[in-house]
Image: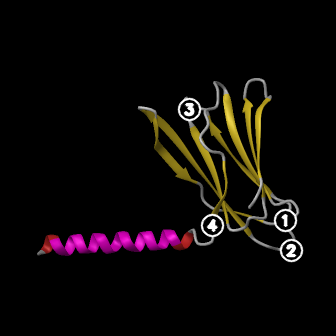
Amino acid sequence: MRARVKLLIAVLFNIMLLSVAAQAQAGMKPIADTGMLTPGPGQVLRITVATTGVKGDENIRVRFRQMEYMEQGNIYRVVSSSTSPPVSLTSDEATSIDIPNTGSPVRGVVLSNSPNVKVLGVVFDTSTQRIVAICTFIPD
């Protein structure tokens, strides 16, 4: 009987945690996705979000999600994933995240409560400081 009560308490606690997490991300939707890519040796993927041109005092929240993949028989599986804490931006502010080369494919996703931001992805070589690739994202 005690085991059932402990199990019930554990299940209810997990449901509460999931509910809190869902409320914390309320209104945050994916607005940009790099897709899976593999930076070369000495390269970094930098994703920058800017609020240039956003009118008014709109408080824009942004989060970055990064994932690392591993190939298993021509199928790629996520082996690690993390999401940054929310960053609040107002008009004419920017924030960025660097996703380093791990030797495995990586992916970056930007979540925001506003589609009115500009997102730029750049892969650059850390030794030469030269840009290797640029990806811009156009909102729907």
Rounded to the nearest whole Å, what is the CA distance between mark 1 and mark 3?
Answer: 34 Å
Name the mark on residue 28. 4
Name the mark on residue 134. none
Q: Given this view, does label 4 or label 1 mark the residue nearer the observer?
A: 4
Q: Look at mark 3 in the image and give the residue it sits on.
A: 102
Q: Amino acid at mark 1?
A: Ser
Instruction: Give residue 91's quadrant in the image.
Output: bottom right
Instruction: Give residue 84's quadrant in the image.
Output: bottom right
Secondary element at tag 3: loop
Task: Look at the picture and state if 88 lies above or below 65.
Answer: below
Residue 6 locus on image (x, y percent):
21, 71
Residue 118 locus on image (x, y percent):
79, 56
Name the mark on residue 91. 1
Q: Is residue 134 left or right of residue 108?
A: right
Q: Given this view, does label 4 or label 3 mark the residue nearer the observer?
A: 4
Task: Look at the picture and state if 19 lies above or below 78.
Answer: below
Residue 2 locus on image (x, y percent):
14, 73
Q: Amino acid at mark 4?
A: Met
Rounded to the nearest whole Å, what is the CA distance between mark 2 and mark 3?
Answer: 40 Å
Rounded to the nearest whole Å, what is the CA distance between mark 1 and mark 2?
Answer: 7 Å
